[in-house]
Image: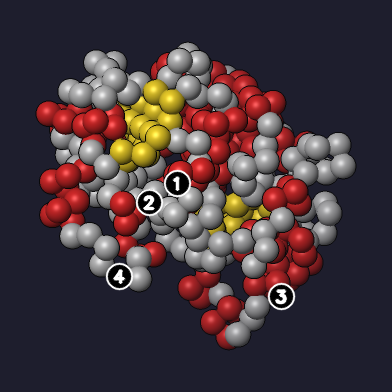
Amino acid sequence: MVIDNNIQFDKNNKLKHFLNIENLTKRHINDILNLADKFASDKNKKFKNLEGKTVASLFFEPSTRTKTTFELASKRLSADFINIDIANSSTLKGESIIDMIKTLEAMQCDMFVVRHANSGTPHFIAKEVDQKIAVINAGDGTYAHPSQAMLDMYTIKKYKGGFNNLKVSIVGDILHSRVAKSLICSLKILCVDEINIIGPENLMPDNKDVLGVNYFFDLEEGISNSDVIIMLRLQKERMHDALISTNDYYKKYGLTSKKLLAAKKDVIVMHPGPINRGIEIDSDVADGSNSVILDQVSSGISIRMAIMSLLLENK
C-alpha cells in the first residue's frame, strides 16, 4: 500500500486527520504540546470542546494505555464515546473495514480512532470517510504511532525544559517499532542535537544510515552522557523468526542500575509500555527515581485531548 502522508492536511495546511509525524512542522507539534499543557494545568477535569460529538474507537490490536487514554480524553472533552468490540463485531461475518466505517458514518460518528496490524490502514480509512470526519492513527503495523510520540515529546519538554542541547538515546527493537519511527521524526523536527539508536544489528532498519541518527551496538557506549533514554519492547508478534533470545537480549541491552550510571545523573528513563521487566528493563530502574514512565501515561490523556480538539476545531 502506498501511504499518502499529505492526506492529513487541509488546503490551509491545518490538520484534519492525525496519521503520522513525518511531514508535520515544528508549529504543528508545538500547537499540540501547548494545548495539552493548558489542559494539564487546568484544575477542571471536564471541558466542552467535543460536546455533541461522537468518537468511535476501532482497535484491531490489543491496547491498554492508548485505548484507555483516548476514551478518557474523549469523555473529559464531553464527547460521546463508542468502544467497538472488534472481536464480536460483524467483521467476523465478513464485513470489510470500509463497510464498517460507512455504517458508523451513518450513525453520525465524528471521529475514528484506529489501531490496526497493517501499516497504512488509518490512511486508507481517512481517504474514504466524509470530509467532516477526523481519523486518528492509534498505531498501524510497524509504520507509525504519532500520539505516542507527542506524549513522549511532552514528557521530555516537561522534565528538560525544551529540546535544545539534548542527547536522546532510543534502545531496543527499532526495526519493528512504530513508536521508534515516530519518535525519530519528532526529535528531528524539534531539532534535538543528538539522537542515538542502540540495539543488535538484526533489530535495526536497513535504512539506519540515512535516518540522521547515530547507531551503537553497545548499550553503555550508546547511552553515555544521555539526557533521555527511551527503552522499547521486543516486538515478538511482528518477528517472523526468533531474531534474538530474551536472555541474550537482557544481558546486552537490559537497562540495569549499573548500566544506567553511564548516562547523566539527571537522565530520565522512558518506556511506551507495556514493560517486559527483566528483559528490556529492571524493576529498580523502571520504578526508580530516574523513571518517568507513569508520568508518560498521565501525559497521554492531555496530549490526546489536544489532538482531538485541534482536529475537530479545524473541521
Q: CA distance from mark 2 to mark 3?
A: 37 Å
Vertical placement of residue 67 versus 86, above or below? above
Lower position in the chain sequence, tag 2 or tag 4: 2
Q: Which residue is mark 2?
A: 204
Which amino acid, by three-letter code, is at mark 2? Met
Seen in the picture, residue 93 relative to 239 is either above or below; the reply is below
Image colouring? secondary structure
Answer whether labels 1 and 2 touch (C-beta < 8 Å): yes
Kindly check if marks 3 and 4 are in contact, taking CB atoms under 8 A apart as contact.
Answer: no
Pick whichever of labels 2 and 3 is earlier in the sequence: 3
Instruction: Identify the residue at horizontal 48%, vertical 57% (top origin).
Output: 142
Question: Label 1: few (<14), some or many (≥20) within 10 Å?
Answer: some
Q: Which three-letter amino acid code belongs to the residue tagged 1?
A: Lys
Please provide percent x and percent y for residue 126. 73, 58
Q: Which residue is mark 4?
A: 241
Going by the numbered disc 4, the residue's amino acid type is: Asp
Looking at this view, name the residue that lies furthest to the bottom: 93
Measuring 50% from the left and 16% from the top, which residue is drawn there?
Answer: 164
- Identify residue for label 1: 208
Task: Please name whichever residue, 94 or 11, is drawn nearer the observer in this view of the structure.
Answer: 11
Vertical arrangement, residue 38 with respect to residue 216, above or below: above
